[in-house]
Amino acid sequence: MSLLNIVKKEVRELLTPATVLPVVLMFIIFAGMGNFFGEAAEKAKEMPKIGLACNDDGNASKIFVDVMKAYCNIVTWNNSIEEVKERKGFALIEVPSNFSSNIENFSKAGIKIYWVINDIGIANAFPYETIKNIIEIAEREIANNILEERKINASFVSNPINEEELTVFKEKEIDVSPSVILQFFSTQSTTVPIIVMIIILTSGGMVITSMGMEKENKTLETLLTLPVKRSNIIAGKIMGAAIVGFIIAMIYMAGFGYYISSFSGEKIDLSEYGFKLDILDYVFISLSLFSSLLAGLSLCIVIGAFAKNYKSAQTLTLPISALAIIPMFLIMFKGFASLPFSLKAIIFAIPFSHPMLAPSFLLLDAYSIVIAGITYSFIFSLICIAIAAYIFKTDLLLVGMMRNGKKLFWKR
Amino acid sequence: MKAIEVKNLVKRYGEFEAVKGVSFSVEEGEIFGLIGPNGAGKTTILRILATLIKKSDGEAKIFGLEVGINDDEIRKIISYLPEEAGAYKNMTGRQYLAFIASFFDEKEILQRGIEISKLGNRIDDKIENYSKGMVRRLLLARALMTMPKLAILDEPTSGLDVINANEIRKMIKRFAKEGMTFLVSSHNMLEVEYICDRIALIDAGRIIEIDEPEKLKEKYDAKNIEEVFIRAIK
């Protein structure tokens, strides 16, 4: 009962408009950005508007014009840049009268492209790249036509080698390119670490802040003289912070997930090759996340015991941030397997690494390292909780560390 | 049974002795005052008896329960009001009292707390909107509503205006008459003289005198406790 009272009090103290509003704002920003990039990507799929002034009626120019008509929205056939501008076109392409004759004589044919910039911004760069790619298509079509006219198999000439790919990975032979496999695993090692990092940072910050606020608002002494066990106070603070941290992390992730999904292209599925997570794997991932969160929050309560107010609590979240961010970057950009032994040991020693690594390890059936990580995180939590319980039972929490009556950390 | 029994109590921080072998006892239903200048060791003694910090040496018992050994039991029968105590600002006065009451079994605690606080309709306002005096009244209500056997009050009227301070002094006297024991510390010698049955004068971690205020005034031929204190430490 007293534990539940502490949990409710913690949630009420931590879940305030001041903590929720910035997160909701972040959600709106992420969702807005996702929406914007999604729209930009959709727009990029649209046919770019161009003006096409063709002054040649030869065979090559006909092929060129047909390709341009197939892939572009021709807003004017006149040689008028003003009309292109007026109709929000991106380019005016002028085909000279000697275009086809030059090609027939094996002389390079020229075209003139007048680019029109309607607006600045990253999203506005897509149509120009698209137009250039379409011109390359037209160029290939003309080249193929030259070859066909000379009775040469154009498709063979342009692609004379037939590639048959077989990637050997973890004692399996998979008929896809290594880049596809690497992309599949990089998806696992990007999203999961970010989710874990956000949950650890928000919940951990909550615990440390809660301790700082108790001291700043001078409520800790009252709490410690109530008939409630110290272990319940510690557990209540951890559970309260975990609940609030989880709610906040979910709001963040909803916005972030929408933002990321606006970029993602086709989903890669390697389940037919055995690379899939089953129910047991998800149980392991949940256990890994839970043990890691428990370890993080236990560590935070030890650190939070040394916070003397809200401001110092904010500073004390820095080591936790570092411990969550370092493994995230190393796992995202380098991968665990390619790290030197010393870095592997450091990554393993940080409990937050394990849920970041777990999905990839489980996909590769490396259960032993996942179980070792979970066990390690639980042991780490128990040690931190024991230290926290010791601090809560001693004078350290209220008077800090003192020597000869002089403070080493603080004294109220 | 004595409410408080303290024998040769010592508190050290490294080589520094904040409390140097203090001994005193308090009878049940008595209002006992600790008075002395800043840094004399008053708050340290109160914090040890409130189970917040550990004693370095000596013995301290509350209603026969040994401090440092029976702390969980002691916390069920005491309440402690620190000098600079605060309350959870996001809560209303009622929510705060309900939170404290939730750790006790008695159902009437909350209603009693609301009555003691005398905050009227403001009990449902957020604590962050309370004046210093209102917060102190709420905290005193929190300390007394559970009807503890021993109330340890560190500077109970600290920061209060004359009217509020007077009300709180009357309240302490009323609860003492009903059988509650009080251990009070204060800088305010007149306040101590008014409310305490007996007082202990503390200086530099040592008790230099313990007796009833009237007897001390007589002993030192002083008009008030302030004069007693000045003469006693000479």
Image (cartoon, coloured by chain):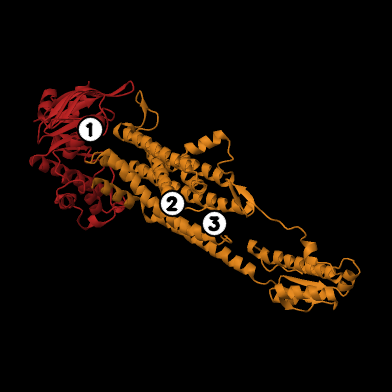
Chain colours: A orange, B red
Q: Find the residue positioned furthest to the right.
A: A105
Q: Amino acid at mark 3?
A: Glu
Is residue A140 or residue B45 the one in the foreground? Answer: A140
**Mark 1 near mark 3, Cβ–Cβ under 8 Å?**
no
Above or below, comparing residue B158 to residue B220 in the picture: below
Which is in the foreground here, disc 1 or disc 3?
3
Amino acid type of the residue that numbered disc 2 sits on in the rendered structure: Tyr
Position in image of residue A27 (x %, y %):
47, 59
Residue wearing tag 2: A282
Eye-nearest disc, 1 or 2: 2
Crowding around mark 3 (Cα neighbors within 10 Å: few <14, some 14 to 19, many 20+) is few
Q: Position of residue B221 (x, y in %)?
A: 13, 24
* Quadrant of the rendering where the N terminus of chain B is positioned: top left
Q: Of the residues shown, which amino acid type is indicated by label 1?
A: Leu
Residue under circle 3? A272
Q: Is residue A226 left or right of residue A274?
A: left
